[in-house]
């Protein structure tokens, strides 16, 4: 799994005129799933994400997590995070999981994240053409890949 995590003051995702997910202060997570990903990746990434200390404390130091700040999370599926540009100029998405493998892991990720946060996780619509709007706070953007665990 690969995640692009952005600390936001607000974010939303829509499909056409319908807003499917919207948050204030919290994290926007763009999530890409590979064929080789499994339950262990879901658990590790969810734990890492909610405990990531990227929110400022009273001294302006990034010392708080989305869990301690009681922030919201918006998760948007994005298979293009697994694009390979090794050959030519047209990206290949061969490493991205097919929907029949990706959807159960995406749903498990959202469920696990909600359980750890103790509240609902907002989402886009898997497989749909979506428009994402955000105000990146900082800006703070972090990329995590469960293959590298760094």
Image (tube, rainbow, N blue to C red):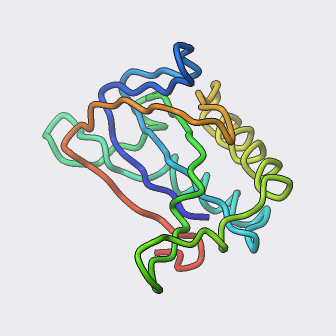
Q: Which image quarter holds the N terminus?
A: bottom right
Residue at position x 41%, y 43% from top?
65
Residue at position x 60%, y 68% from top?
93
Image height of 48 relative to 71, above or below: below
Tell which of 132 and 74 is nearer to you: 132
The picture places residue 17, in percent across and down from the top left corner, at 52, 13
Q: Residue furthest right?
A: 100
Q: Is residue 99 left or right of residue 60?
A: right
**How many numbered marks does the figure carry?**
0
Which quarter of the picture shows residue 2?
bottom right
Residue at position x 76%, y 42% from top?
107
Tell which of 133 and 71 is nearer to you: 133
Image height of 93 relative to 5, above or below: below
The picture places residue 49, in percent across and down from the top left corner, at 51, 51
Residue at position x 27%, y 38% from top?
136
The picture places residue 108, in percent across and down from the top left corner, at 77, 46
Q: Is residue 131 left or right of residue 42?
A: left
The picture places residue 34, in percent across and down from the top left corner, at 68, 67
């Amino acid at each position: 799994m690969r995640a692009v995590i952005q600390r936001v003051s607000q974010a939303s995702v829509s499909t056409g005129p319908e807003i499917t997910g919207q948050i204030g202060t919290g994290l926007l997570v763009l999530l890409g799933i590979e064929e080789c990903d499994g339950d262990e990746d879901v658990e590790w990434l969810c734990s890492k994400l909610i405990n990531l200390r990227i929110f400022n404390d009273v001294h302006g130091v990034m010392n708080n997590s989305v869990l301690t700040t009681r922030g919201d999370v918006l998760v948007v599926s994005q298979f293009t995070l697994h694009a390979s540009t090794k050959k030519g100029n047209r990206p290949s998405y061969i490493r991205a999981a097919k929907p029949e493998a990706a959807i159960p892991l995406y749903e498990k990720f959202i469920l696990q994240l909600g359980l750890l946060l103790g509240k609902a996780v907002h989402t886009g619509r898997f497989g749909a053409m979506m428009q994402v709007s955000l105000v990146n706070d900082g800006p703070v953007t972090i990329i995590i890949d469960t293959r590298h665990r760094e």
